[in-house]
Image: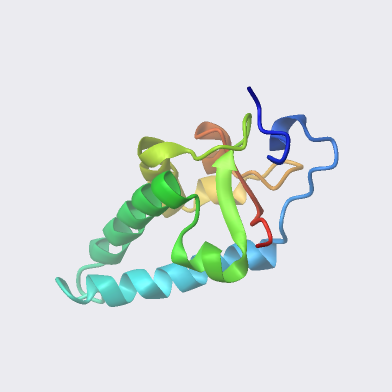
Amino acid sequence: MSNPHAPAAPATDPTFTPPTLGRRFGALIIDWVLCLLAANIFADPVRDGWAPVLVLILVYGLFLGLFAQTPGMYITKVRCVKWHDGGRIGVFRGLARGLLLALVVPALIMDEHRRGLHDRLTDSVIVDAPRR
């Protein structure tokens, strides 16, 4: 049974409009700063460049998998959901998306729905967060 109040899956919604790149980039900057601060607890992010990247991948895996939003996405009012059904992407896809995002290049290759290669490979999309 489907929920009549649930938003349509982005893939099947002809009116789907993705959030601006500014909001997506803002979320990434906020998340990156938080990851730098967190990595500073167990490593020197300047000397050990892998530490904040590892934290970013883990944050994406856990937060996207469990809550559909990272802290930066929460602040910029966007979320990451499955392209085909609008549900959570799960921890494994969140980790894969974080790893691909850390490679940077996949994020720069976008389609008409502003889905980067990392989104397409993990069947995800960034959408506006529902208003509460």
**Quadrant occupied by the C terminus:** bottom right
The count of marks equals 0
Quadrant of the image occupied by residue 65: top left
Residue drawn at 66 percent across, 33 percent down: 3
Image spot of residue 11 (x, y percent): 71, 32
50 vs 105: above or below: below
Residue sticking out furthest to the top? 1
Residue 103 seen in this snapshot = no
Is residue 106 found left or right of 97 in the rendered image?
Answer: right
Residue 55 seen in this snapshot = yes
Image spot of residue 12 (x, y percent): 76, 29
**Quadrant occupied by the N terminus:** top right
54 vs 120: above or below: below
Q: Look at the image and name its color scheme.
A: rainbow
Is residue 32 found left or right of 109 in the rendered image?
Answer: left
62 vs 132: above or below: above
Residue sticking out furthest to the right? 15
121 vs 97: above or below: above
Quadrant of the image occupied by residue 21: bottom right
Residue drawn at 76 percent across, 42 percent down: 112
Quadrant of the image occupied by residue 50: bottom left
Residue drawn at 68 percent across, 40 percent down: 6
Is residue 94 found left or right of 45 in the rendered image?
Answer: right
Image spot of residue 47 (x, y percent): 20, 74
The answer to which of 132 and 98 lies nearer the viewer is 132
Image spot of residue 16 (x, y percent): 79, 43
The answer to which of 50 and 91 lies nearer the viewer is 91
